[in-house]
Image (cartoon, rainbow, N blue to C red):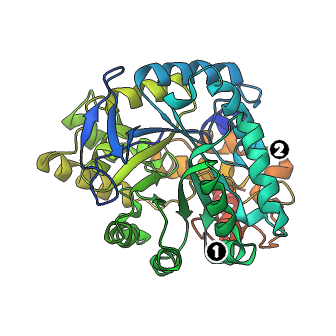
Amino acid sequence: MDRRDFIKNSLLFTTGAVLLSGCSFNKEVKVDKTGGITTAKFKSLDVSMLGYGCMRIPLKPSGEIDEELNKKMVKRAMEAGVNYYDTAYMYMGGKSEEIMGRALKPYERASFNLTTKMPVMMLEKEEDVERIFNEQLKRCQTDYFDFYLVHCLNKRNWENTKKYNVIPFLEKMKKEGKIRHLGFSHHDTPELLQEIINYYDKWEFVQLQINRLDWKTTRGEEQYNIARKANLPIVVMEPLRGGLLANLNTEATKILKDYNPNASVASWAFRWLAGLDGILTMLSGMSTPEHLEDNLNTFTGLKPLSKEEQTVYDKAIAAHLKQAAIGCTSCRYCECPVGVNIAGIFSLYNQYVYDDEGRKKGSFISHYEALRESERADKCIKCGLCKPKCPQQLDIPVLLEKVHKKYLEVKGA
């Protein structure tokens, strides 16, 4: 793999799944008879606890989407019992819905659950809501969506949701049978999460960012508890924190491998989540067949961590957190107007930090310099347009400056 391929592919990691309970759905967790993947009962549905996330579809070495590989991976996932497929209007540069529509077309419609989202951040007038929804049906080659979400609700996007009467329109789509289950994804404070839940009493599920790193540091536990109190089944996004929990630093990885050399680092994160109640499915952005196979292995007879394993994992996480990093999940919602490769830059910095500062100085320099000059951190014009788009609420211009200073320091410039 050359340097530019590394930059593209270093952003693509797996994500995972869990146990559940709650008034809105059955406590039953069972093994799918056809494939062995653990499933959760949601109303009349058996939903695979491994969700196929479509924000990180496989790429070719050239950077183009590898649609044929994605079709092969979907086929493998379907055969194994994975039946929850999650896309969105803007994923993969707006191509994800069409790609997944083609990938799922050969399969009986009732054999899988298709999920997409209303991009309220893109709305400019009320008419956009119906236009986009109809476009999504066409892109996905379907007559209905099993699960549909109001996408990425932060304070600004929530105001757009109300301003453009999104919920009344989606209620109408439910009555017409074009939406089976309605929910929302949340990217803000616990206080706003409670406000959204209180505003509309017919939400059927919620999508939250829950993982071991965010549990305390970004009030993840508080948000989880609010959803549980409201009896809302939880779809988990970023359970590996954009791949960070699959790529812990050297010390943390050694702790886990010394305890169980056969378990992948990612599997520990999934099994930590398996100790939580209320989880409907986990979204995994699987960009390689290896990611898929590792996930299938983890979710076949999914088991939560034992008390002893929990102690080991806590020790590993503590070792990992001793090193400072940037909490970017590579969602790429920030899209720089002048072309700075924000997610790529942060990924390179995080890898440098987690590789024990200096053990791979040459790699950090060479991969950073493999970026086009126009993509580098020092080309940030500090316009601030990226900041309100970031679900993690990162001060992106400040962090870009930090990375560039580190590059100059390491290079000795």
Compare residues 360 and 288 and report the one nearer the observer: 288
Name the residue at 20% across, 45% down. 305
Compare residues 202 and 67 and report the one nearer the observer: 202
* Rendered position, 145 above or below 298: below
Quarter holding residue 10: top right
| Circle 1 residues within 10 Å: few <14, some 14–19, many ≥20 | many
The answer, for residue 394, to whether it is visible in the render is yes
* Rendered position, 56 above or below 385: above
Which residue, given by chain and number where applicable, does mark 1 sit on?
Answer: 158
Which quadrant holds the N terminus?
top right
Left or right for 55, reference 376 = left
* Rendered position, 140 above or below 133: above
Quarter holding residue 322: bottom left
The kind of secondary structure element at disc 1 is helix
Closer to the eye: label 2 or 1: 1
Counting residues from the start of the chain, the first of labels 2 and 1 encountered is: 1
Q: Which mark is residue 372?
A: 2
Q: Which mark is residue 135?
A: none
Q: How many marks overall?
A: 2
Q: Position of residue 333 (x, y in %)?
A: 70, 57
> How far separated are the C-alphas under marks 2 and 1?
36 Å
Which quadrant holds the C terminus?
bottom right
The kind of secondary structure element at disc 2 is loop
The answer, for residue 248, to whether it is visible in the render is no
Q: Position of residue 174 (x, y in %)?
A: 60, 55
Compare residues 357 and 86 and report the one nearer the observer: 86
Q: Residue furthest front?
A: 176
Q: Position of residue 412 (x, y in %)?
A: 67, 54
| Circle 2 residues within 10 Å: few <14, some 14–19, many ≥20 | few
> Disc 2 marks which amino acid?
Arg
